[in-house]
Image: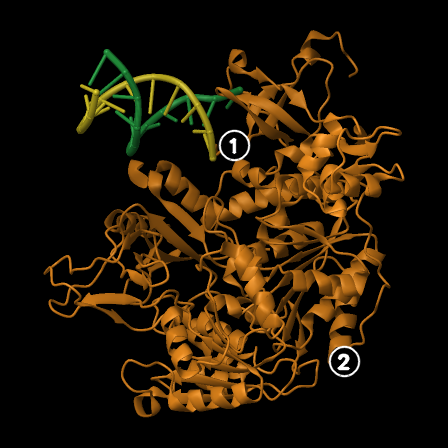
Chain colours: A orange, B green, C yellow
DNA sequence: AGCACGCCGACT
DNA sequence: GTCGGCGTGCTC
């Protein structure tokens, strides 16, 4: 610092953004002799505790009583300051989502261990000449392995010798082995751009060339719109290769469920190494390593779930959002953002290409491509040359199964043939548990959740009644709680467990398997069972929506949708879109590799336009109709509007606030409240939500209006959450 | 009295 | 988001 002895300079104060829900950056003193720049990561006292923060841009708040100011307690000098582009991104996201900027920063600084240098790894090594007091077979194995004097980590040595770590502890105790410090982990090897170039089909080549050509031209967004199995991944791998050639880092965002070993292997096949992973199940230590590697530039490619978007990349030059239509890119709590949209924003602010890929793009992205905001690359055929599956509706009014059964004769017949051929079948039903409703056949009592009044779902495995909204669960009673009649309860309707029961009756010799997120054993077991299906170790799979994405099942030839109408009747304005996407993805599993796939959609409304478009494999028919309908009703993404989801502690208050917000809107903002009939009163996690559409001219700052309303509105707006649910393309 | 909750405001 | 303060209501 220049004028070190100038008293005025000793009083340096700066803005520091702290990771809490306060409306603006706070002001802190900088210790004498220390220099910080915007983006420097610091630790500061805040109330009774110390928190991480980052020095922020802009003049510090001069209005704060100077004897209230506290001093920065620590400066992380080895951590690279958050760069200008990341800081602008944080501010942008905070403004768009109506969140305090500190809460967005929190997503960037989520790995505190990343900021500490990793302690050296301790290893063990053989001490020359020392022998254990008593020799045992396990000890001998350890001695054999360590004979050459090379140092091992405890766990890898235990594994290599085939013994438990306690054997090693014993030998350490007797000083046969000694502890040594191992060098810190070497940076992971860089992906090799030319490791194994895949042979592309002509359509893939066109798309790949187009993506490569979009580099160096600023913020170009491309949509890869290709049917299931068309090889979108191979195409965007070439974009990653180009980013790497240009010396940039690349980020691939996937819905959490699609982050699979299978995907990592595909990456390895192309680039020779595994990419860095970032998702909720990464251990804190690995998390810290990836965070630091990303910031230093050692890590070149990250494959991650939505939160990876907030990593502090040293030089990010490409984002891929695969399965861009997927709802898992939306975060619902804390900062409610859509990682697909915020990826487009990050690319825009940092002027690099962003690639959105899907077999069933969101209506928003289709519209953006139609309007020329996005470049579109179509892949109309499967890369393997296999034909798309042959889809057929089964009219359940005429050709349904007998009472108490759920699989129609025609579907059963097809399953029989597939089984005889040694092919896999998938029965899809997006309903967990055994039965969605339980009632008393004596008095008609229906089991309802005491917290949110939705039906309790019977789970026969766990012998419990479970609320799928709030998680409440109770055991199944012997007698009806209303009329006390014993053994009078009946299960109504099917869930996957009930379908599995029927399949086991129909196919006693087949290997059946349920794939559902709630089965005992957790994600670990689910991964194992996915692998079993992948390797052909099951004949008939009964699955919920998690079979729709991520995993590729090479032996699957038949898909039966048990209830194709489920989801179409929802009040959600995106119900038709979601159903189309889900069913297209699920039926697309059939014959993806082998060809010759077949699909059956059991329905009571075979003439529904969504199902008709699905069955004719005519995606454009669906999108054109849906886009027209949205345009006509002014639903997103039309009408220059922001769609807001408002949720609050109780229905009446929430509705009241929403109406007040709508009423108070200035003239230039036209406001529509979507009432319960159209859409909006849905129970989600025990909270009433509903959808409010605020339409405003582009130049009108809706976010500012809403923020002001929240700040100055009725006091009871505290529990209220406002969520912007529209893509920001209009505002870039 | 002793404490478990829940609500509320402050945090620079 | 997290903490402390303070009120309520319940138990020893």
Closer to viewer: mark 1 or mark 2: 2
Q: Is residue A447 left or right of residue A606?
A: left
C-alpha separation, residue under disc 1 versus residue under disc 2: 52 Å
User: Where is A602 relative to A128, above or below?
Assistant: below
Q: Residue at x 73, y 80 (%)?
A: A203
> Circle 1 marks a residue in which chain?
A
> Circle 2 marks a residue in which chain?
A
Q: Residue at x 28, y 60 (%)?
A: A456
User: Where is C4 relative to A368, above or below?
Assistant: above
Dot 1 or dot 2, earlier in sequence:
1
Q: Residue at x 50, y 65 (%)?
A: A546
- The image position of residue A200, as x and y in percent, is 78, 77
Q: Which mark is residue A24?
A: 1
- The image position of residue A411, as x and y in percent, is 43, 87
**Is any atom of residue A562 visible in this view?**
no
Q: Is residue A297 left or right of residue A396?
A: right
- The image position of residue A196, as x and y in percent, is 84, 67
Q: Nearer the viewer, residue A296 or A352?
A: A296
**Residue at label 2?**
A201
**Quarter where residue A713 is shown:** top left
- The image position of residue A113, as x and y in percent, is 65, 33
SS category of the residue bearing label 2: loop
Q: Is the residue marked by circle 1 packed among few (<14), some (14-19), or many (20+) residues within 10 Å? A: some
**Is any atom of residue A27 visible in this view?**
yes
User: Where is A213 relative to A188, above or below?
Assistant: below
Q: Quadrant of the C terminus of chain A?
A: bottom right
């Amino acid at each position: 610092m220049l004028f070190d002895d100038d008293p005025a300079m000793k009083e340096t104060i700066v803005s520091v953004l702290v990771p809490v829900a306060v409306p603006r950056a706070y002001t802190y003193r900088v210790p004498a002799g220390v220099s910080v720049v915007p983006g420097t990561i610091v630790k500061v006292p805040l109330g009774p505790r110390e928190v991480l923060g980052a020095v922020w841009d802009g003049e510090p708040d001069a209005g704060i009583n100077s004897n209230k100011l506290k001093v920065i307690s620590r400066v992380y000098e080895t951590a690279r300051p958050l760069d200008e582009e990341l800081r602008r991104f944080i501010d942008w996201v905070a403004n768009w989502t109506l969140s305090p900027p500190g809460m967005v920063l929190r997503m960037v600084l989520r790995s505190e261990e990343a900021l500490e240098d990793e302690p050296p790894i301790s290893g063990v090594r053989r001490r020359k000449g020392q022998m254990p007091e008593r020799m045992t077979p396990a000890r001998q194995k350890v001695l054999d392995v360590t004979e050459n004097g090379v140092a091992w980590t405890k766990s890898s040595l235990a594994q290599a010798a085939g013994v438990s770590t306690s054997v090693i502890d014993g030998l350490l105790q007797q000083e046969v082995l000694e502890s040594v410090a191992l060098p810190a982990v070497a940076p992971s090897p860089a992906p090799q751009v030319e490791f194994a170039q895949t042979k592309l089909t002509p359509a893939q080549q066109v798309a790949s060339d187009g993506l490569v050509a979009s580099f160096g031209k600023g913020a170009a967004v491309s949509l890869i719109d290709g049917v299931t199995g068309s090889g979108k991944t191979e195409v965007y791998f070439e974009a990653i290769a180009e980013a790497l050639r240009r010396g940039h880092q690349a980020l691939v965002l996937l819905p959490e469920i699609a982050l699979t070993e299978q995907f990592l292997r595909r990456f390895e096949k192309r680039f020779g190494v595994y990419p860095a992973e970032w998702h909720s199940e990464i251990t804190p230590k690995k998390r810290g390593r990836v965070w630091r590697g990303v910031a230093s530039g050692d890590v070149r490619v990250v494959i991650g779930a939505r939160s990876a978007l907030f990593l502090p990349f040293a030089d990010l030059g490409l984002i891929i959002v695969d399965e861009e239509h997927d709802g898992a890119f939306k975060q619902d709590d804390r900062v409610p953002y859509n990682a697909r949209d915020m990826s487009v924003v990050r690319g825009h602010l940092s002027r690099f290409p962003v690639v959105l890929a899907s077999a069933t793009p969101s209506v928003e992205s289709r519209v953006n491509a139609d309007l020329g905001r996005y470049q579109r690359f179509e892949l109309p055929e499967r890369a393997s040359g296999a034909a798309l599956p042959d889809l057929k509706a089964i009219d359940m009014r005429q050709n349904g199964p007998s009472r108490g059964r759920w699989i129609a004769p025609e579907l059963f017949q097809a399953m029989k043939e597939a089984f005889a051929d040694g092919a896999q079948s998938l029965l899809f039903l997006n309903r967990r548990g055994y039965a969605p409703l339980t009632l008393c056949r004596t008095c008609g009592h229906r089991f309802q959740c005491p917290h949110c009044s939705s039906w309790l779902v019977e789970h026969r495995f766990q012998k419990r009644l479970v609320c799928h909204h709030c998680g409440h669960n109770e055991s199944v009673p012997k007698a009806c709680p209303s009329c006390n009649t014993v053994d009078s309860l009946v299960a109504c309707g099917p869930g996957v467990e009930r379908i599995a029961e029927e399949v086991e009756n129909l196919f006693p010799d087949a290997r059946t398997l349920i794939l559902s997120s709630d089965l005992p054993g957790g994600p670990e077991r689910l991964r194992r069972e996915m692998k079993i299906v992948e390797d052909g170790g099951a004949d008939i799979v009964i699955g919920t929506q998690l079979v729709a994405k991520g995993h590729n099942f090479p032996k699957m030839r038949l898909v039966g949708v048990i209830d194709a109408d489920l989801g179409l009747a929802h009040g959600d304005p995106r119900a038709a879109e979601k159903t189309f996407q889900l069913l297209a993805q699920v039926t697309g599993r059939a014959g993806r590799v082998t060809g010759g796939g077949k699909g059956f959609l059991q329905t009571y409304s075979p003439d529904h336009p969504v199902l008709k478009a699905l069955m004719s494999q005519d995606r454009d028919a669906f999108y054109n109709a849906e886009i027209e309908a949205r345009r006509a009703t002014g639903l997103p993404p039309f009408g220059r509007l922001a769609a807001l989801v408002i949720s609050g502690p109780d229905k009446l208050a929430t509705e009241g606030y929403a109406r007040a917000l709508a009423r108070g809107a200035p003239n230039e903002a036209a406001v529509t409240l979507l009432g319960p009939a159209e859409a909006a009163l849905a129970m989600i996690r025990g909270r009433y939500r509903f959808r409010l559409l605020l339409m405003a001219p582009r130049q009108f700052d809706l976010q500012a209006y809403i923020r002001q309303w929240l700040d100055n509105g009725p006091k009871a707006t505290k529990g209220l959450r406002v969520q912007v649910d529209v893509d920001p393309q209009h505002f870039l």
